[in-house]
Image (cartoon, helix red, strand yellow):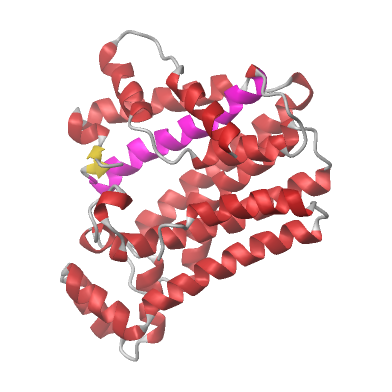
Amino acid sequence: MERIRNIIEELFDKIEFPDTPNGLYDPLRYMIGIGGKRIRPTICLLSYSLFKDEFTEEVLAPAAAIEIFHTFTLIHDDIMDRSPMRRGQQTVWKKWNEDTAILSGDVMLIDAYKRIAQAPNECRDQVLSLFSTTAAQVCEGQQYDMDFEQRDDVSMSEYEKMIGLKTAVLIACAAQMGAIMGNAPKTMHRALYDYGYQVGMAFQVADDYLDAFGDEKVFGKPIGGDILQQKKSWLTIKACSKTTDPSAFMSVFRTKDIEKVKSVYVQLGVDLDARNEIEKYNSQAISILCQAGFSNEQIQVLKEFADSLVGRVK
């Protein structure tokens, strides 16, 4: 895992975009420069390393592409959500303007496809198909997320479908892509997709939990953002399903009073429910690997990765 982290750090330290026009490419350098957890390229290369040892440029480029695509979605999401901060820094639209953020996000998507096209010849079509399907699904998830802001009757099954599309499928894609490039047996790269999906679900529930109960310095965003933006999080949906008076809860939620809403969450036990849900998803992820015939050593590596994604939830 340490070797892969070092490879990824070097990969993004050396990543290049065109020099001009500055107004188009400076936001790309800015977003890559402020870092992030690099979850998606990490699981891509981690999956690859289960089957092969040599990290060639034709493997590294698609891994970088997944992170660049993810960063593109963040730039546009921040405009839609009116988020002023990302990873402890100003968002692109806030630092520059909305027009710049839209155009820089667009060129970031194009850059991601250029890097995906560098995948090994023998699996390029498969990698491109997987990536394209996933990219569309992420956009579908974002649309559902925006639709839900206007509704008070969102069910947990609808919410889980939304976060599956918006968050989990890209982590699943990264895990499977690494295995495909590593020439893994089909049963194993499908299992890695399913593993990544479960890990992605755990990660999103953890993100929702931390938005209300996390430490702003660690979380990298202001606490209570979902409440202020009136976004339906896992906590919100669970609270509506547990309370005897959903309308009364939504009235409290609409006040945008972060502490009042959090108090209701605690009274209903939703905070503890979220932590149990995170554990459930991670357990399911490991079970998938066991059933697919991965070795104990491989499973331990992937378990450590899964645990690292939700380690901020205490």
Residue at image x 68%, y 36%?
178
Q: Is residue 155 in sight in this rendering?
A: no
Q: In this view, does 307 lie above or below 85?
A: below
Residue 86 rendering spot, x and y as whole percentages: 29, 42
Q: In this view, does 11 lie above or below 133?
A: above
Residue 7 rendering spot, x and y as whole percentages: 56, 27
Residue 47 rendering spot, x and y as whole percentages: 68, 40
Q: Is residue 34 magenta?
A: no
Q: Farthest bottom residue?
A: 244
Residue 292 rendering spot, x and y as whole percentages: 80, 56
Which of the image's four quarters has the N terminus? top right
Magenta span dominant secondary structure: helix
Residue at image x 76%, y 27%?
123
Which residues lie in the magenta part?
A: 58-83
Residue at image x 38%, y 33%?
35
Which of the image's four quarters has the C terminus? bottom left
Residue at image x 63%, y 55%?
303
Relative side of 212 to 187, left or right: left
Relative side of 244 to 66, left or right: left
